[in-house]
Amino acid sequence: MTTTHEASTGRRTADLSALDGLISHTTVQGIPALHAPHPGDITAGLFFRVGRADETLATSGVTHLVEHLALHRLSLSDVHHNGATANTYTLFHVTGDESEVVAYLNGVCAALRDLPLDRLETEKEILRTEAASRAHGPNHQMALWRYGAQGFGLAGYDELGTRRLTADQVRHWAETRFTRDNAVLWITSDRLPDGLDLTLPTGSRNPTPTATDALPVTPAYIRGGDGHVVFDAVLRRSSAASVFADVLGRALFQDLRQEGGYSYTADADYTPRDADFATLRAYADALPEKQDAVVGGFVDTLARLRAGRIEQAELDSVRGKLLKRYDTPDLSAALLPSYALNLLLGHEILSPEQHKAELRAVTVADLHEVAREAWDGGLLQVPTRGADWAGFTPAPNYSPSAVTGTRHPSLESDDVTLVIGADGVSLLLPGGPVTVRYDACAAMTTRPDGARDLTGLDGFRVAVEPTMFRDVGAERIAALDAAVPAAVVVPLPARAPERIPHPRVPEAPVPQARPADAGDTAPSGLRSLPVWFLLLVALEVVFALGFLFAVVQATDPAHPVWHWLARAVVPAALASYFTFRAYQYAREHG
């Protein structure tokens, strides 16, 4: 789904002329290069305009794999270097003397030209191990709820491609994305070092992915983990938006920590997403007993800024802090990475003076406008009951419709049915359907035991477990496999038998035998009878004697027969019934 609220900003094409006299720019082997002097060791970075958002869910991790493979032969070097794969770029960076920097950059490019694909399976295993040890942050759900299982939403998913990618696929990705026309070099030096050989295949500059939108209505909210409140919004890139992020962070800190004492951490940040838009993300933590108070205070702070209640002093304080960044020694070298990334993404490039002028021009009214934009497109994660009371709509938990096909009732719940149709699969739940259509399937994982797990481009997921639904045999699984495009199928290894789910059947209570006492000589069957059973038997005897007495007294002319029968027969009948039920209980429970 293409986003509906992210219209073009009419930005200007990146123009390096604003940097004349501040940063030198040239090309090396066809790659744009920016450089500025800095004392001490040289730091260099080679950006490529490819990242996780360019992949699909079924191939996710391919960029990360290329990065690892390119660094393999350099991994034993003592030089400080690394690689990073982000949503829209991949970066190889190094710090060292001139010869070390040259050797590193040349080695990276040589490896990209001829990847050590004999290492492919080993590097896949390394990436899976890395993912297993990586802790999920409190905001890991935000991307997948906002964008779905595609584009920028892939940051919220595992790298499934590490299960299925072939050597040919990885090689093709490197040849078409890691090209000289899709790269930018930056280096903290007054000149380009001698001996650079950054030869790479020719190609083209890849545009950033088109953002998708999985939220039909905003502002929206989702339920998240206890102890975390997160707010996420997509804003047009501007100096006013970056200032607003700092204003929001300070306001949250003051309201939730300094005044309320509810949170330890309360902050906000602003991160460029692509050429035109940035992500605003705010966060606050809370103890379980303070969660409602934190949610309320968090929303109140957002609402205050949205209503325009922003003090000039708040703006002035943040602006002063941002302007001080331009007093940094060797400013030109410090700005090289951001300038190189803007050039790579195609964002407007401003000189320090131009940017300072924009900061000085920001007004309280500008911040009010940004606050309204953030609120209108916001996604709030709350740990408590919800945020309907604040005007946020629950993010959709169900699909608009279900497919038609064969129905397979759940073996565990009468309220759940799996439908496998010609167009897709649906899980019919009490609250509504969850549907994944084959033509909009981002990935389907398969297990040798027959399990199939389908994820739609919109982020909805249906797990088909043959052990959990009636009549989901090999024939139905084969039909499902034939309908799903092969390009999105991701085989997973076999599961241990105890990992395969089975319906939960309530277990009958197991009688717990009391240890026999040494002096206890009563028969075991009598000891196992409940006390209330014995009492009922005694009552039965009493009522029986009462009945006999009633019969004898029936000859008394002062009292009619029906009077004595009513007093004796009815209680005796009731006692008989309960005694019979007690006898049944004794037989069933030993």
Image (cartoon, rainbow, N blue to C red):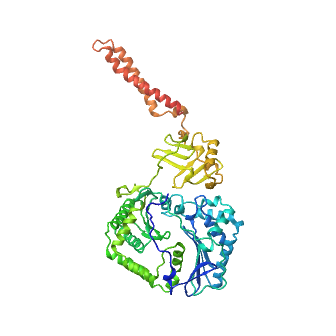
Where does residue 307 sit, x and y in percent of width and height?
A: 32, 66
Where does residue 297 sit, x and y in percent of width and height?
A: 35, 64
Where does residue 102 sit, x and y in percent of width and height?
A: 65, 82
Q: Residue furthest right?
A: 118
Vertical position of residue 367 compared to residue 500: above or below: below
Q: Give 106 or 394, whichever is nearer the viewer.
A: 106
Give the left or right position of residue 28, taking residue 413 as reference: right
Where does residue 138 sit, x and y in percent of width and height?
A: 48, 63
Q: Residue at x 50, y 82 (%)?
A: 17
Q: Is residue 28 visible?
A: yes
Vertical position of residue 497 compared to residue 58: above or below: above
Q: Residue furthest left?
A: 558
Quadrant location of residue 421?
top right
Q: Is residue 410 visible?
A: no
Quadrant location of residue 340?
bottom right
Give the left or right position of residue 33, taking residue 531 as reference: right
How many dots with numbers? Answer: 0
Give the left or right position of residue 164, taking residue 299 as reference: right
- Which quadrant is the C terminus positioned in? top right
Q: Give 501 or 369, whichever is nearer the viewer.
A: 369
